[in-house]
Amino acid sequence: MSQPRPLTTTSTHDPLIHVKQLTHTITTRNQRLTILDNLTFSVPHGALFAINGPSGSGKSTLLNMLTGIDRPSNGRILFSGTELRARGENELARWRGTHVGIIFQFFQLIPTLTALENILLALELGGGNGLPRKSWRARALVCLEQVDMQEYALRLPAELSGGQQQRVAIARALANDPPVLVADEPTGNLDSGTAHQVFSLLIHLVEQGRTVIYVTHNPTFAAYASAGIDLSDGRIVRERNAQARLTARGGTQP
Ligand SMILES: Nc1ncnc2c1ncn2[C@@H]1O[C@H](COP(=O)(O)OP(=O)(O)OP(=O)(O)O)[C@@H](O)[C@H]1O
Protein backbone atom coordinates (compact mmCIF):
# COMPACT_ATOMS: atom_id res chain seq x y z
CA MET A 1 0.00 0.00 0.00
CA SER A 2 1.46 3.36 -0.97
CA GLN A 3 1.84 6.11 1.60
CA PRO A 4 -0.45 9.13 1.43
CA ARG A 5 0.84 11.86 -0.81
CA PRO A 6 2.26 14.78 1.18
CA LEU A 7 0.18 17.76 2.14
CA THR A 8 0.57 20.28 -0.66
CA THR A 9 -1.20 23.21 0.98
CA THR A 10 0.19 25.00 3.99
CA SER A 11 -1.92 26.22 6.85
CA THR A 12 -2.23 29.94 7.34
CA HIS A 13 -0.70 31.48 10.43
CA ASP A 14 -4.12 32.50 11.75
CA PRO A 15 -4.71 30.46 14.86
CA LEU A 16 -8.09 28.77 14.85
CA ILE A 17 -7.75 27.65 18.45
CA HIS A 18 -5.69 29.23 21.21
CA VAL A 19 -5.13 27.15 24.34
CA LYS A 20 -3.71 29.14 27.23
CA GLN A 21 -2.38 27.64 30.45
CA LEU A 22 -4.87 24.81 30.38
CA THR A 23 -4.78 22.54 33.41
CA HIS A 24 -7.15 19.72 34.28
CA THR A 25 -7.19 17.94 37.60
CA ILE A 26 -9.53 15.28 38.85
CA THR A 27 -10.10 14.02 42.35
CA THR A 28 -10.45 10.29 42.77
CA ARG A 29 -11.38 8.56 46.04
CA ASN A 30 -7.99 9.12 47.60
CA GLN A 31 -5.94 11.41 45.43
CA ARG A 32 -5.88 14.47 43.22
CA LEU A 33 -4.53 13.81 39.73
CA THR A 34 -3.25 16.39 37.28
CA ILE A 35 -4.19 15.01 33.86
CA LEU A 36 -3.25 18.09 31.82
CA ASP A 37 -0.59 20.40 33.16
CA ASN A 38 -0.37 24.02 32.06
CA LEU A 39 -0.70 23.54 28.29
CA THR A 40 -0.28 26.54 25.99
CA PHE A 41 -0.39 26.09 22.22
CA SER A 42 -2.38 27.05 19.17
CA VAL A 43 -3.95 25.18 16.28
CA PRO A 44 -3.47 27.04 12.99
CA HIS A 45 -6.43 27.49 10.69
CA GLY A 46 -6.24 24.89 7.92
CA ALA A 47 -3.85 22.59 9.77
CA LEU A 48 -3.66 18.84 9.93
CA PHE A 49 -2.92 18.93 13.66
CA ALA A 50 -1.70 15.89 15.61
CA ILE A 51 -2.00 15.34 19.34
CA ASN A 52 0.51 12.55 19.86
CA GLY A 53 1.62 10.68 22.95
CA PRO A 54 1.63 7.35 24.73
CA SER A 55 -1.39 5.79 26.38
CA GLY A 56 -2.51 7.77 29.40
CA SER A 57 -0.70 10.98 28.39
CA GLY A 58 -3.95 12.97 28.26
CA LYS A 59 -4.70 13.06 24.51
CA SER A 60 -8.40 12.18 24.64
CA THR A 61 -8.97 14.41 27.64
CA LEU A 62 -7.44 17.32 25.73
CA LEU A 63 -9.50 16.60 22.60
CA ASN A 64 -12.68 16.64 24.69
CA MET A 65 -11.66 20.05 26.08
CA LEU A 66 -11.06 21.44 22.58
CA THR A 67 -14.57 20.47 21.48
CA GLY A 68 -16.18 21.67 24.71
CA ILE A 69 -17.33 18.17 25.68
CA ASP A 70 -15.37 18.60 28.93
CA ARG A 71 -14.37 21.77 30.71
CA PRO A 72 -10.83 22.34 32.01
CA SER A 73 -10.22 23.03 35.70
CA ASN A 74 -8.16 26.08 34.75
CA GLY A 75 -7.04 27.96 31.69
CA ARG A 76 -8.64 29.24 28.52
CA ILE A 77 -9.64 27.85 25.14
CA LEU A 78 -10.40 30.41 22.48
CA PHE A 79 -12.05 28.97 19.37
CA SER A 80 -12.11 31.50 16.53
CA GLY A 81 -11.60 34.15 19.18
CA THR A 82 -14.55 33.07 21.34
CA GLU A 83 -13.98 31.56 24.74
CA LEU A 84 -15.61 28.12 24.95
CA ARG A 85 -16.34 28.34 28.67
CA ALA A 86 -18.39 31.50 28.08
CA ARG A 87 -21.04 29.39 26.34
CA GLY A 88 -23.76 27.55 28.25
CA GLU A 89 -24.18 23.78 27.78
CA ASN A 90 -27.05 24.05 25.28
CA GLU A 91 -25.36 26.78 23.29
CA LEU A 92 -22.15 24.74 23.29
CA ALA A 93 -23.96 21.64 22.00
CA ARG A 94 -25.55 23.68 19.18
CA TRP A 95 -22.20 25.27 18.35
CA ARG A 96 -20.50 21.85 18.28
CA GLY A 97 -23.19 20.47 15.95
CA THR A 98 -22.35 23.01 13.26
CA HIS A 99 -18.66 23.77 13.86
CA VAL A 100 -17.08 20.42 14.67
CA GLY A 101 -17.43 17.02 13.00
CA ILE A 102 -16.36 14.14 15.23
CA ILE A 103 -14.75 10.91 14.00
CA PHE A 104 -14.31 7.95 16.37
CA GLN A 105 -11.88 5.04 16.51
CA PHE A 106 -14.69 2.47 16.36
CA PHE A 107 -16.69 4.42 13.72
CA GLN A 108 -19.89 4.35 15.82
CA LEU A 109 -22.26 4.11 12.88
CA ILE A 110 -25.82 3.10 13.75
CA PRO A 111 -25.86 -0.59 12.72
CA THR A 112 -29.51 -0.66 11.64
CA LEU A 113 -29.20 2.34 9.32
CA THR A 114 -27.65 2.36 5.86
CA ALA A 115 -24.63 4.54 5.10
CA LEU A 116 -26.96 7.15 3.59
CA GLU A 117 -29.34 7.04 6.58
CA ASN A 118 -26.43 7.45 9.02
CA ILE A 119 -25.57 10.72 7.29
CA LEU A 120 -29.22 11.81 7.13
CA LEU A 121 -29.40 11.26 10.89
CA ALA A 122 -26.41 13.58 11.39
CA LEU A 123 -28.20 16.21 9.29
CA GLU A 124 -31.33 15.74 11.40
CA LEU A 125 -29.35 16.13 14.64
CA GLY A 126 -27.36 19.11 13.34
CA GLY A 127 -30.39 20.90 11.90
CA GLY A 128 -29.31 20.31 8.31
CA ASN A 129 -26.93 23.27 8.43
CA GLY A 130 -29.70 25.57 7.21
CA LEU A 131 -30.53 23.44 4.17
CA PRO A 132 -34.20 22.69 3.44
CA ARG A 133 -35.12 19.11 4.37
CA LYS A 134 -35.88 18.22 0.76
CA SER A 135 -32.20 18.70 -0.16
CA TRP A 136 -30.77 16.61 2.71
CA ARG A 137 -30.63 13.42 0.66
CA ALA A 138 -28.63 15.16 -2.07
CA ARG A 139 -26.35 16.64 0.60
CA ALA A 140 -25.80 13.18 2.15
CA LEU A 141 -24.90 11.78 -1.29
CA VAL A 142 -22.41 14.61 -1.84
CA CYS A 143 -20.79 13.73 1.51
CA LEU A 144 -20.52 10.07 0.45
CA GLU A 145 -19.02 11.18 -2.85
CA GLN A 146 -16.39 13.24 -1.01
CA VAL A 147 -15.12 10.04 0.61
CA ASP A 148 -15.62 7.99 -2.56
CA MET A 149 -18.39 5.87 -1.02
CA GLN A 150 -21.40 6.90 -3.12
CA GLU A 151 -21.74 3.37 -4.52
CA TYR A 152 -22.25 2.03 -1.01
CA ALA A 153 -25.02 4.42 0.04
CA LEU A 154 -27.59 1.68 0.63
CA ARG A 155 -25.34 -0.75 2.51
CA LEU A 156 -25.58 -1.37 6.23
CA PRO A 157 -22.35 -0.86 8.26
CA ALA A 158 -22.00 -4.65 8.72
CA GLU A 159 -21.87 -4.98 4.92
CA LEU A 160 -18.82 -2.69 4.72
CA SER A 161 -15.13 -3.21 5.54
CA GLY A 162 -13.58 -1.34 8.47
CA GLY A 163 -11.97 1.21 6.15
CA GLN A 164 -15.26 1.73 4.28
CA GLN A 165 -17.10 2.20 7.58
CA GLN A 166 -14.57 4.84 8.62
CA ARG A 167 -15.09 6.60 5.28
CA VAL A 168 -18.83 6.68 5.92
CA ALA A 169 -18.13 7.97 9.43
CA ILE A 170 -16.01 10.75 7.91
CA ALA A 171 -18.85 11.52 5.46
CA ARG A 172 -21.19 11.71 8.46
CA ALA A 173 -18.78 14.13 10.18
CA LEU A 174 -18.92 16.32 7.04
CA ALA A 175 -22.74 16.33 6.92
CA ASN A 176 -23.29 19.72 8.52
CA ASP A 177 -20.28 21.20 6.71
CA PRO A 178 -18.20 21.94 9.83
CA PRO A 179 -14.93 23.85 9.36
CA VAL A 180 -13.19 21.52 11.83
CA LEU A 181 -12.99 17.75 12.07
CA VAL A 182 -11.68 16.06 15.21
CA ALA A 183 -10.70 12.43 15.26
CA ASP A 184 -9.68 10.28 18.23
CA GLU A 185 -7.37 7.52 16.94
CA PRO A 186 -9.22 7.51 13.57
CA THR A 187 -7.16 4.60 12.28
CA GLY A 188 -6.68 2.76 15.56
CA ASN A 189 -9.02 -0.02 14.45
CA LEU A 190 -7.65 -0.40 10.91
CA ASP A 191 -4.75 -2.27 9.33
CA SER A 192 -1.85 -0.11 8.28
CA GLY A 193 -2.68 -0.01 4.54
CA THR A 194 -6.25 1.07 5.21
CA ALA A 195 -5.00 3.54 7.83
CA HIS A 196 -2.80 5.25 5.23
CA GLN A 197 -5.82 5.50 2.88
CA VAL A 198 -7.82 7.18 5.63
CA PHE A 199 -4.95 9.64 6.19
CA SER A 200 -4.89 10.37 2.45
CA LEU A 201 -8.54 11.30 2.76
CA LEU A 202 -7.93 13.53 5.81
CA ILE A 203 -5.06 15.25 3.97
CA HIS A 204 -7.40 15.82 1.00
CA LEU A 205 -10.00 17.40 3.29
CA VAL A 206 -7.33 19.74 4.70
CA GLU A 207 -6.33 20.69 1.17
CA GLN A 208 -9.97 21.62 0.58
CA GLY A 209 -9.77 24.08 3.47
CA ARG A 210 -10.84 22.18 6.58
CA THR A 211 -8.89 21.94 9.80
CA VAL A 212 -8.40 18.39 11.06
CA ILE A 213 -7.26 17.69 14.62
CA TYR A 214 -6.46 14.10 15.41
CA VAL A 215 -5.20 12.05 18.31
CA THR A 216 -2.70 9.27 17.77
CA HIS A 217 -0.25 7.25 19.80
CA ASN A 218 1.53 6.22 16.58
CA PRO A 219 4.52 8.41 15.61
CA THR A 220 4.18 7.33 11.95
CA PHE A 221 0.70 8.80 11.77
CA ALA A 222 1.71 11.85 13.84
CA ALA A 223 4.34 12.59 11.19
CA TYR A 224 1.63 13.32 8.61
CA ALA A 225 0.64 16.43 10.56
CA SER A 226 1.42 19.95 9.42
CA ALA A 227 1.50 20.95 13.09
CA GLY A 228 0.92 19.34 16.44
CA ILE A 229 2.05 18.61 19.95
CA ASP A 230 3.51 15.59 21.69
CA LEU A 231 2.20 14.93 25.19
CA SER A 232 3.77 12.96 28.00
CA ASP A 233 2.16 12.73 31.43
CA GLY A 234 -0.14 15.64 30.58
CA ARG A 235 2.65 17.98 29.51
CA ILE A 236 3.78 19.20 26.10
CA VAL A 237 7.18 17.70 25.42
CA ARG A 238 7.43 18.73 21.78
CA GLU A 239 5.69 21.09 19.38
CA ARG A 240 5.50 20.06 15.76
CA ASN A 241 5.40 22.79 13.20
CA ALA A 242 5.73 21.77 9.60
CA GLN A 243 6.45 25.35 8.50
CA ALA A 244 10.10 24.72 9.37
CA ARG A 245 10.07 21.45 7.44
CA LEU A 246 8.27 23.11 4.55
CA THR A 247 11.08 25.63 4.27
CA ALA A 248 13.68 22.92 4.56
CA ARG A 249 12.20 20.36 2.20
CA GLY A 250 9.68 22.19 0.09
CA GLY A 251 6.82 19.99 1.31
CA THR A 252 5.61 18.21 4.39
CA GLN A 253 6.84 14.68 4.40
CA PRO A 254 6.03 12.07 6.98
N1 LIG B 1 -12.54 10.02 34.97
C1 LIG B 1 -11.27 9.69 35.26
N2 LIG B 1 -10.93 9.26 36.49
C2 LIG B 1 -9.66 8.95 36.80
N3 LIG B 1 -8.65 9.05 35.92
C3 LIG B 1 -8.93 9.46 34.68
C4 LIG B 1 -10.24 9.80 34.27
N4 LIG B 1 -10.21 10.18 32.97
C5 LIG B 1 -8.92 10.07 32.60
N5 LIG B 1 -8.16 9.65 33.62
C6 LIG B 1 -6.71 9.44 33.59
O1 LIG B 1 -6.16 10.55 32.93
C7 LIG B 1 -5.04 10.15 32.18
C8 LIG B 1 -5.22 10.61 30.73
O2 LIG B 1 -6.30 9.88 30.12
P1 LIG B 1 -6.62 10.02 28.57
O3 LIG B 1 -7.72 9.07 28.25
O4 LIG B 1 -6.82 11.44 28.23
O5 LIG B 1 -5.24 9.50 27.94
P2 LIG B 1 -4.90 9.11 26.44
O6 LIG B 1 -3.57 9.69 26.14
O7 LIG B 1 -6.03 9.49 25.54
O8 LIG B 1 -4.80 7.52 26.57
P3 LIG B 1 -5.14 6.35 25.49
O9 LIG B 1 -4.15 6.54 24.37
O10 LIG B 1 -4.87 5.11 26.26
O11 LIG B 1 -6.56 6.51 25.08
C9 LIG B 1 -4.91 8.65 32.31
O12 LIG B 1 -3.92 8.38 33.27
C10 LIG B 1 -6.28 8.24 32.80
O13 LIG B 1 -6.20 7.08 33.61
Image (tube, rainbow, N blue to C red):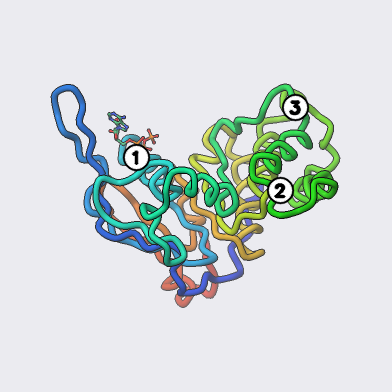
Is 118 located above or below residue 235 in the figure?
Answer: above
- Residue 1 in the figure: left or right of residue 244: right
The mark nearer the N terminus, 2 or 1, is: 1
Mark 2–mark 3 Cα distance, whole angstroms, equals 18 Å
* In front of the other: 6 or 187: 187
**In which quadrant of this rendering is ligand 1 seen?**
top left
Mark 2–mark 1 Cα distance, whole angstroms, equals 37 Å
Q: Quadrant of residue 60?
A: top left
Is 104 located above or below residue 200 in the figure?
Answer: above
Which residue matches tag 2? 128
The x and y percentages for residue 246 are 49, 73
Residue projecting furthest to the left: 30
Q: Quadrant of residue 173?
A: top right
Labelled disc at residue 113: 3
Is 74 located above or below residue 113 in the figure?
Answer: below
Mark 3 residue type: Leu
The mark nearer the N terminus, 2 or 3, is: 3
Mark 1 residue type: Pro
Disc 1 beta carbon < 8 A from ligand 1? yes
